[in-house]
Image (spheres, coloured by chain):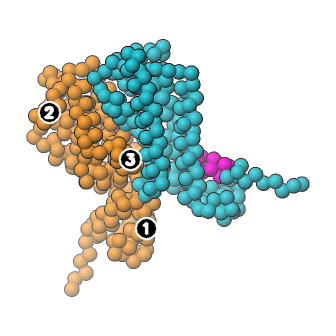
Chain colours: A cyan, B orange
Amino acid sequence: MPKAIDHDQRRRDIIDVTWKLIVKGGLEAATMREIASEAGFANGALKHYFPGKDDIIQGAYQLSMDRIVERLTESTKGLTGIAAFRAIVSATMPLDDESRESARVLLAFWERGLSSTDIRDAYQGHLAGWRADSLGLIAQCREQGLIDTDASDEEIVREMIYMNVGATVLSAIAPGFADRASIEAMIDDFFERLGVPTAADA
Amino acid sequence: MPKAIDHDQRRRDIIDVTWKLIVKGGLEAATMREIASEAGFANGALKHYFPGKDDIIQGAYQLSMDRIVERLTESTKGLTGIAAFRAIVSATMPLDDESRESARVLLAFWERGLSSTDIRDAYQGHLAGWRADSLGLIAQCREQGLIDTDASDEEIVREMIYMNVGATVLSAIAPGFADRASIEAMIDDFFERLGVPTAADA
């Protein structure tokens, strides 16, 4: 029997396990011992795949970002104008189980960002890209007369980002203030203020 | 020389030190070893004042909440109507050094809320009180014709809370998206939408 260990697969497994531990109990729950045990490794064997805990955490963070980008790409496929903008606003909101899990992981990473320049930089890079994409879409919508508001493009994007960060945190620690219906109502309000229809055909 | 140790003062000192460590590097930086060293205790001596780390963390969290309530109370002193509401909206925003420090500590506690029911409960209790106070003020403003908007009272409060949570997180990990000017502009927008003047005399 050939000893064909797929090292990339092992690394992905370790990151998956780490992700699940963070979803359950935050970064505190993702100890090296717990990660090793859940991934089926002997204590200390993780070192063959990741030099240290920070590298595993960075990997799980990258997985979060990849999942968000994947959702964004999927949700806007074939859409333009307001429908595309609405998809961008909704895709990263904690509206289903998967995005509620992502929200918990994201909150954990934001806390880690208090001490890690790498995580702050990565998040700011993500924000910058998201902001640029949204500004592009908003400009497109304005040109086509699909947005009619006194608010500047920057103000619209700012509101979108604050709304998203607020929903991420609240869905994780005060879900009564961020259930699905209330987040959807908030998104409707947001688009109403842009002077566009809020119905599903928007 | 009498051995007059002020145990309450010692406890406050320990919590102060913990607060400062969290401001600097998040909960990760607030190890028992570091807290003891910064507070001038021998390793292990903390146990005489707090049974465990969770109790210290809970104490630091209570300090955060107390500081927020203190700011709210001070800032609304002698004010009524829109001025009082504006003071409530602004007081907890990361607009100065003190509230930016509080924002970092709050973010750390929210992460801890992923695994701690106590912290989630305490934050939800805080939100409920803040929400009730704000609803009272909004009703008062409506009666006096100081608010004129189609948005419901609940929608106004929701927007206020999301704005606050968003600013708290962003000021800590993406300060370029939440500098003082941009937060103030956002508060102005918020009050403009309520149909009230945004000038300092509001």
C-alpha span from label 2 to label 3: 28 Å
Q: Of the residues shown, which amino acid type is indicated by label 1?
A: Met
Q: Chain of mark 1?
A: B
Asked whether, in this view, residue A141 is left or right of residue B10, the answer is right
Q: CA distance from mark 1 to mark 2?
A: 48 Å
Q: Position of residue A123 (x, y in %)?
A: 46, 46
Marks 1,2: beta carbons within 8 A: no
Q: Mark 1: give few (<14), some (14-19) or many (20+) Cα within 10 Å.
A: some
Q: Quadrant of the N terminus of chain B?
A: bottom left
Q: Amino acid at mark 3?
A: Ala
Element on which disc 1 rests:
helix
> Dot 2: within a 10 Å radius of its alpha carbon, few (fewer than 14), some, or many (20 or more) residues?
few
Q: Is residue A95 above or below residue B124?
A: above
Q: Residue at horizontal 34%, vertical 46%?
A: B176
Say what secondary structure mark 2 lies in: loop
Q: Chain of mark 2?
A: B
> In the image shown, does B78 or A162 lie closer to the viewer?
A162
Pointers 2 and 3 within a single chain? yes
Residue type at mark 2: give it: Ala
Q: Say the numbered circle drawn on residue B32.
A: 1
Horizontal side of residue A69 vs A111, given as left or right:
right
The residue to which callout 2 is attached is: B199
